[in-house]
Amino acid sequence: MDGATDGGILAGIPEGFAPRHAGGPFLEPIGPVFRRPEDAGARFGIRIERRHCNNQAVAHGGMLATIADIVLGIGGAEQAGTPGHFVTISLVTDYLAPAPLGAWLECHPVLLRRTSRMMFVEGRFTADGVIVLRASGVFALPRPKG
C-alpha cells in the first residue's frame, strides 16, 4: 500500500520517502522528517502541519531553521561518508517566501566541501515547488577514533 492511501504516517507523503528519525527528543514534536535516497545524495521532506505554523498559517521561521539545521547536517554527513554525530558551527537562513500550511517542504542538500574536521553544506527548500528558504551550514565532524 502506498503512503498516499494507507491513512497512516505516510498519508500524503510523496512516493519513495520514508521516515528518518533524528535529533533526539527535541525534534520529536516536529518530525518525522522524511528521506528518499537518490544517486546524488538523499532528498529530505516534511509536510507543513498546523503545529509547524505561526498565526498566519505558514511555517514558523524557527521551525524552518530547525529543519534546515537537521537536513543540511544529515545530508552533508551522508555525502561526506562520515558516520556519527555532527555539531552545528554556523547556520545561515534566507527566507524567500512563505511555506503554507499543507505544503510539502523538500530539500536536496549539497555538500560543498569537506575537510578532516568540518563540512560546508547548502540547500534550497521548496514548498510545493516554490523556493521558500535558502540555507547554508558549517558543521564540525566527529574526531577520528584512534
Image (spheres, rainbow, N blue to C red):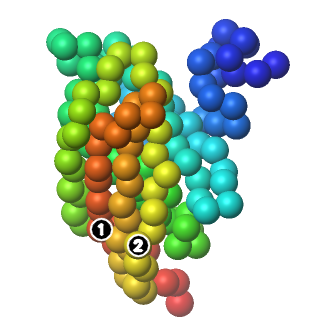
Q: Residues within 10 Å of mark 2 (few under 14, many from 20)?
A: few
Query: At 32% across and 20% down in the image, what residue appears?
Result: 100
Q: Which residue lies furthest to the front in this view?
A: 130
136 or 30, nearer to the observer: 136
Q: In this view, does 8 lie to the left or right of 62?
A: right
Q: In this view, does 110 lie to the left or right of 67?
A: right
Disc number placed over residue 138 in the picture, else none: 1
Query: At 20% across and 18% down in the image, what residue appears?
Result: 54
Under mark 1, the amino acid is: Val
Under mark 2, the amino acid is: Leu
Secondary structure beneath dot 1 equals: strand
The part of the image, by quadrant, that contains residue 116 is bottom left
- The residue beneath circle 2 is 112
Query: At 22% across and 40% down in the image, what residue appears?
Result: 96
Q: Residues within 10 Å of mark 1 (few under 14, many from 20)?
A: many
128 or 118, nearer to the observer: 128
Q: Position of residue 25 (x, y in %)?
A: 40, 36
